[in-house]
Image (spheres, coloured by chain):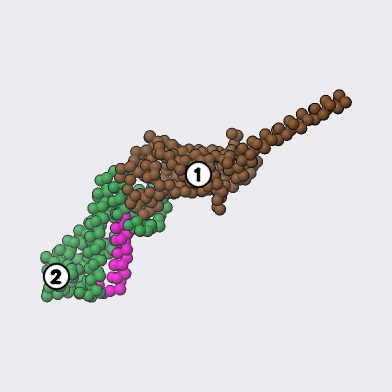
Amino acid sequence: MRRGRRASWTARWRVATATGIAASAWLCAFASGTAPVAHYVLDPAKGSLEFNFDQAGAQNKGKFTRFQVSFDFSPDSLAASRLEVTVEMNSANTGDQERDDTLRGADLFAVAKFPQAHFSASQFTRTAGGFEALGKLTLRGVTRDVRVPFTFRNATENGVAVGYMSGKTTLRRLDFGVGQGDWKATDQLGNDVGVSFALRLTAAAR
Amino acid sequence: MVMRNTTERWGALSQLLHWLIVVLIIVQVTLAEMADELPAGMKKLTLLARHKSFGITILGLALLRLAWRLRNPTPLLPGTLKPYERALARITHLMLYVLLFAMPLSGWMMSSARGFPVSWFGLFQLPDLVPKNKALYEALLTTHGTLAAVLAAVVALHAAGALKHHFIHKDDVLRRMLPFPSTTSGVKR
C-alpha cells in the first residue's frame, strides 16, 4: 500500500513534468511561430546586390561589393523571422572611377558622413510570388519603410543548410536625400532607383 | 526650288541636310568644349547627354544624306578644274562622308566602352556597340579626339575650296549649295 502510493506519486510527478515540458515547448513554439527558425548569413562569394538608375534616358548599373546579411527565417514561422542587411556605401561600384567618386560624394551617398546603409525587417508576409519583407531602410541618415518582395528556396548542399534569396524593389532616391544641389533635379538623373539582389545564404550558429 | 538634285544644282533636301549638319557640328564642338571645362557633375553629364543625342542625330542625317545622294544625280565639278584639284575635291568630299559616320560611331562606341549607355534625348536607349572595357575606352577617346581634329582640317579645306570657287574662279560651285537662285553665269565646265 505504502509502496503503491509512493510509486503513484512518482508516476504523477513524471506525468506532470512531461506535461510541463510539453506545454512549455508548445508555448515556446507558439510564441515563436510554430517552427524553428534557421539563422542564415551571407555567402560573400555568391551574393550580388545591384542597383540601376536612369541617367539622361540611359540605364546605368552598379553594385555594392561589401554588405552583410543576417537572416533568421523559416517559411513556416514568418512571425519569428528577421532580416538585417548592412551595406558599406563606399563599396558602390559602377565600373567607372569618376562616376563612383561622384556617387560617394557629399551630394549623393555622402559616404564620409553616412558610411553604411541598413535595412531591418521583422514583418514578413506570403505573396503570390513568394514573400514580402516590410522593414525600415536607413540610407544617408534617413529612415523610411520599404517593402522588399523576394523569393526564398532552401536546400542542403554537402550537409550544410543553405538558402537562396532573390528579389528586387524600387526606391526613390530623393526620399532619402540622395541628391542635393544640382542632383535634386530628376530630369537628368531619375528619382527611381532599382535595387536587386541574388544571395546564397548559409546556415550558421546564432 | 526642286527637291531632287540635278547635275547643275543641289536639290532642296541635299541643301537642307548639308546646312543642318553644319549647324549641328558647330553645336557639337561647342558642347564638347563646354563639357571638357567642367568638373564631374550634373552639368557635365547634361552637356554630354546632349552631345551624344546630337551625335546620334548627325549619324541618322548622314545615313539619310548618303542614301539620297546615291539615288540622285550629283552636280558635276566644273570642267575647268585641273586633275589635282578634281582629285582633291573628291578626296575631301569622301573624307567628309567617312567622318560624318566615324565621328558619331566612335563617340557611341566610346560611351559603350566606358559603361555610359547612349540615349537619344531621353526618348530611347541605344544598344551598347562594344563591351565595357577601360583600355578600349581610352583608345576610342583618343580616336574620337583625333577624328575631330581631322574633321576640322577637312572642313577648313572644304570651305576654302568653296570660297576659292566663289571668289577666285567666280563659278556656281558655292551658290548651287545655297537656296537662293543661281546667277545667270551658270556652271562653267
The answer to whether residue A84 of the structure is visible from this angle is yes
In this view, the residue in front, B16 or A108, is A108
Q: Relative to residue B38, is residue A29 drawn left or right?
A: right
The residue shown at (32%, 57%) is B121
Q: Which amino acid does label 1 sit on?
A: Leu
> Does the stretch in magenta take in A128?
no
In this view, the residue in front, A66 or A189, is A189
* Residue B82, percent from left and from top: 18, 68
Q: Residue A134 carries which label?
A: 1
Query: Which of the 4 image quarters holds residue B88?
Result: bottom left
Most prominent secondary structure in the magenta stretch?
helix
The residue shown at (84%, 26%) is A5
Mark 1 chain: A
Q: Relative to residue B9, is residue A116 drawn left or right?
A: right
Q: Is mark 2 on a helix, strand or loop?
A: loop
Q: What residue type is labelled 2?
A: Asp
Q: Relative to residue B59, is residue A73 drawn left or right?
A: right
Labels 2, 1: one chain:
no
State the CA–CA distance, disc 2 to disc 1. Answer: 78 Å
In this view, the residue in front, A14 or B144, is A14
Query: Magenta residues?
Result: B52-75
Q: What element carries label 1?
A: strand
Q: Tell me, what hue is chain A?
A: brown
The residue shown at (50%, 44%) is A134
Q: Tell me, what hue is chain B?
A: green
> Does the stretch in magenta take in B72?
yes
Q: Relative to residue A71, is residue B99 drawn left or right?
A: left
* Residue B159, percent from left and from top: 18, 61
The answer to whether residue A87 of the structure is visible from this angle is no
Residue underneath mark 2: B171
Quadrant where the C terminus of chain B is found in the figure: bottom left
